[in-house]
Amino acid sequence: MKELDNHFKLQQVLTTRCTGALPKGEVWLGSRLLERAGLKDTVENHILLAQRLGQDVVCLSICDVPANKPDLGYRYFAPGDLADAAVASDIPVLAVIDGPFQEMVNKVGMMQVLTDWIRNPQTLYCVYEAEKKGALDTIGQCLDLGVDGIVLADDFSTERGPLVNPADIDNMCRDFYAHAVVAAHGAGVPLLLHCCGNLSQLVEIFKAWRLDGFAAIQSNLNNLTDLYEKMGANVMIMAGIESVMLDTDQPPQQSLKSLGQVVASLASTGNFVLGSSCGLYDGDFLDRIQRLYEIAQEG
């Protein structure tokens, strides 16, 4: 029961804040979005923009050395910046941390990682072990600073399914996730996963890893209601808005219909947070996301 209680603390806050309204949140607020809003890309302004958009959580991408990260359209902060967030924010703060697999991809590219997985698995496993240590250290620092949740970003899949055999993913990554979950639950907070692509072949593995939910996953590739039920319910899902809906001022009707179905199915669970699968990068998304929030709330 302890793990469910730990997960529920964040959800309890959201439920209290969002009586009669859908909880909302975004994993990434891009630099150009802040620029369009007339804000510098700082911790305080991430919180301010989240509040302006009516969001109920604020997510900050965290790493030990932000200058070493590739430019992906959003800013990484150092763990110490979370101290400022704790002071400035009256909404829950989640730390978004690249998982060990994602960190390897960041450094050498996806093709090199997949090639090594086939040709040099032992070497790859050794590199993974080093990245695992770094990620767990960053998680520990964030937990010590009192974050309300951890989102691990690890892209294991494509539109067609897992990058490699799911059993190989489980074999390499299981121990890291076991330690990460224990650390998060020991601090009384949930651990969520961001993973692009079709997750259907990985659900049982994610369930065995005891994940508390998912953030910014693709509803056009995953039936979110089925995913929620297969995970055993009580998992948080932050999703529902697809990138195609943000690309134009007039979202496709089929996409809006799908969004309505997701909201109708999951909003009543108390474990659903409306958000995009892609993050908010483009300045044009500023007005469009507000309209999409309104449409989803109206049903």
Image: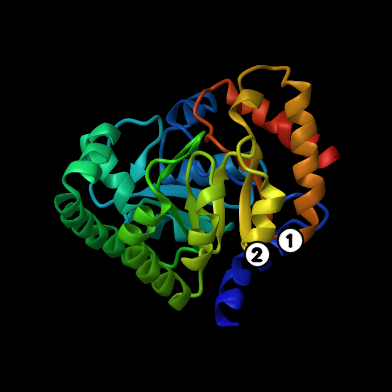
Q: Is residue 16 above or below residue 99?
A: below
Nearer to the camera, 242 or 116: 116
Residue 130, how many percent across, how many down? 18, 58
Occupied quadrant, residue 179:
bottom left
- Residue corresponding to mark 2: 11
Residue 288, how many percent across, how many down? 66, 25
Occupied quadrant, residue 249:
top right
Q: Is residue 65 above or below residue 38?
A: below
Q: Residue at x 55, y 64 (%)?
A: 212
- Cβ–Cβ under 8 Å for marks 1 and 2: yes
Q: Amino acid at mark 1?
A: Gly
What label sits on residue 86 in the rendered view? none
Nearer to the camera, 194 or 205: 205
Question: Which one is earlier in the sequence, the residue at label 1 or at label 2?
Answer: 2
At mark 1, the secondary structure is loop
Q: Residue at x 69, y 59 (%)?
A: 229
Q: Residues within 10 Å of mark 2 (few under 14, many from 20)?
A: many
| Structural distance between the alpha carbons of marks 1 and 2 | 7 Å
Q: Is residue 194 left or right of residue 50?
A: left
